[in-house]
Amino acid sequence: MFEVFKKELLELVRDRKTLFFVLALPMLIFPVIMGLVAFLGSQAALKAEQKVHTYYIVNEQNSEQFAERVFYHKSFKKYDGKHQFLSIEDLKQAVQSGAIDVGIYLEADPTQTIEQGEQASWQVVFNDAQSINFIYDRLKSIANELSDSLREQALVALGVDKSKQAAMLQPILVSKVDTADKRENIGEKLGAFIPYLLIPLVLMGASYPAIDLGAGEKERGTLETLLLTPVTRTQLVLGKFLTVLLSSLACATVTVLSMAIWVSVAISFVELDTIKSAFSSVTGVDFMLIFALLVPIAAIFSSLVLAISIYARTFKEAQNYMAPLSMGVFLPIVISLMPNMVLNAKTALIPVTNVALAIKEIVKGTVDYGLLSMIVLTSIGLAALLLAFCVRWFSKETVLFR
Amino acid sequence: MIEVKALQKRFKLTKEHQQKGKSKDVREHDGYFHSVKNVSFSCAQGEVLGLLGPSGAGKTTTLRMLSTALKPDSGQITINGQDIIKKPLIGRRSIGFLSGSTGLYGRLSARENVEYFAKLHGLKGRELKSRCDALFEKLDMTEFLDKRAEHLSTGMKQKTNIARAVVHQPDVVVLDEPTTGLDIMTTQTVINFIRELKSNGTPVIFSTHHLDEVALLCDRICVIDKGVSCFDDSVAQFKAQGKSDELNQAFMNLLQGAAHV
Ligand SMILES: Nc1ncnc2c1ncn2[C@@H]1O[C@H](COP(=O)(O)OP(=O)(O)OP(=O)(O)O)[C@@H](O)[C@H]1O
Ligand SMILES: [Mg+2]
């Protein structure tokens, strides 16, 4: 068995393509993802922030004050074309044709409507489909300022002193005190995302070498000779299984390590205090725990892909079977994201889902060690079962000589 | 000494195959394909047995049963008196098997390939080293020992395969179409190798479609047709019964005779 393992490992190490997918990809995937998100995010935000929008105001005379403030705002530029727009329809068309970015329709003069006890309603016409867009917020805050000062004046005119206005406008002030600490809050979101990345990578780390070890041997005609050696089928399967497991774990280790390293790098650069404080409480022990959970998952995947690979006649066939599997692995992870899914004695029994849930708990810092050991035990049990199945398959003529 | 008696092997037909129903082979019934129905032959010390038969006759299936890769449904295989169906591990130790389709591990060197199989056969340390070195010397492999198998020429590969098949010094060597698809030089290597085995007293069983090789090497001939061994005797008897001195003609006559009975 040890000889089989040694030889398979040697072959694996000499295979560049597999090595790339098992080691290099997980090493690169985090910096690439983080870099990409940071770059695109900041670029888009910066662009939206810096962009100057062309505006047109209908009925400027209704609020000279507002028109003046928009005019002097650094993000807005007055439309200087020849056209005249009179209605909301006109503004819509102008925005659609690109003549202006935003049109503002001042239907009434607020200083007059307020005296009649009515609201002045203004319309802002713009395209809100763009994801990052500050137009509406900026115009609204200008209008709010005006609105605030008008209200203040009106209340003073009614004899309400400035200092009493706040209490009058909002007699009850409700504020929340959250018992969830920052780590729990962010961990809930981040911890759900991490299994998405980790678990498929573990599967990938297993499936690449497994294809070669099973179907590859069939295709190259080495399986027949291997079967003729006085090594028992159990030994053969175990040797192969250990190789696949090792590769899968290597993939997981590299992934967790690179995650740990790049997260700390990113934290030292990014000035996001919430994420910083949340992550600074994720300790080395937590990373170890995550890794410990990935081991039984890796064992399950290893025996699963090995069984598939033994069954397949050729490389191609094996790859065809792996494709739906790598899609299917997302299913239990998605289940773990469903509302009300928490780690308990029942969910700890669902393979893969349980690990996804547990990883979330670990990142949140609210993990139950009893459940954790239950997960490890059930996963190992399942892996052993699958492995026994592998051995059985490896002794069946109908599978070996299809 | 190897003896094979009344071997039988059938394969379950796939569902699609059963439903098709056309191109019915006579060996197809009850949802099974009776690939080998009744095959018997024997091969004594120092003898070379040629296994002949049309395509699909069941030669490969028979040889795979000899190699213990497949388990016969019934029948007997004994090597030096040992029943290897009951004790497949003994069978695996005493048989060296090589077929046209057996490959090598491409990313291992020729030496590593041979040594891997030696280790799987339980060889270790100095014994392994000396055994392998002697084989490499004999097969003239020393020049390409450390090249990866995927970069070797067909001839080099076949030499490596041969070394791999006999590294555990088997009692019987079984070859399935060992020369099919090989060039003249490599074919000669295989022929020389069979001769060498013969002079060492190791029985050799090989299947082939080349009758000139049979003329060159074989003491005995076994003809399998549609899963039944219809002839198993010496070459002289083969010519006599086939009513021709030419092996080709004798083979045709024998098959036709079998078909008429
Ligand atoms: N694993 C299998 N499952 C189903 N049928 C099989 C299997 N192996 C062989 N057969 C069938 O058994 C028959 C005999 O095959 P075999 O390979 O033994 O022929 P052969 O005599 O070696 O032919 P050739 O000279 O072409 O190599 C064929 O018709 C083949 O389709
Ligand atoms: Mg054949």
Image (cartoon, coloured by chain):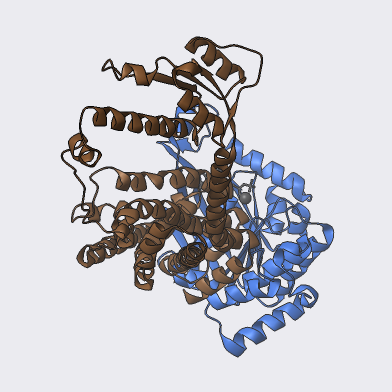
Q: Quadrant of residue A221?
A: bottom right
Q: What x and y, as percent, mark residue A297?
A: 37, 60
Q: Is residue B258 visible?
A: yes
Task: Using the image as rendered, state which of residue B230 and residue B2 is in the foreground.
Answer: B2
> Front-most of B179 and A139?
A139
Q: Is residue A1 above or below residue B182?
A: below
- Find residue A237 and report its image quarter: bottom left
**Residue B198's spot in the image, x, y percent?**
69, 72
Which chain is drawn using brown? A
Q: Residue at x 57, y 59 (%)?
A: A28
- Identify the residue at the far right of this view: B185
Chain coloured blue in the rendered structure: B
Which residue is drawn at the image coordinates 53% and 49% (left, top)? A37
Which residue is outermost to the left? A172
Give left or right: position of A266 versus B187: left
Q: Residue at x 20, y 33 (%)?
A: A160
**Residue lying at 66% horizontally and 18% vertically, measured from the top left:** A81
Compared to residue A131, the image places residue A348 above or below, namely below
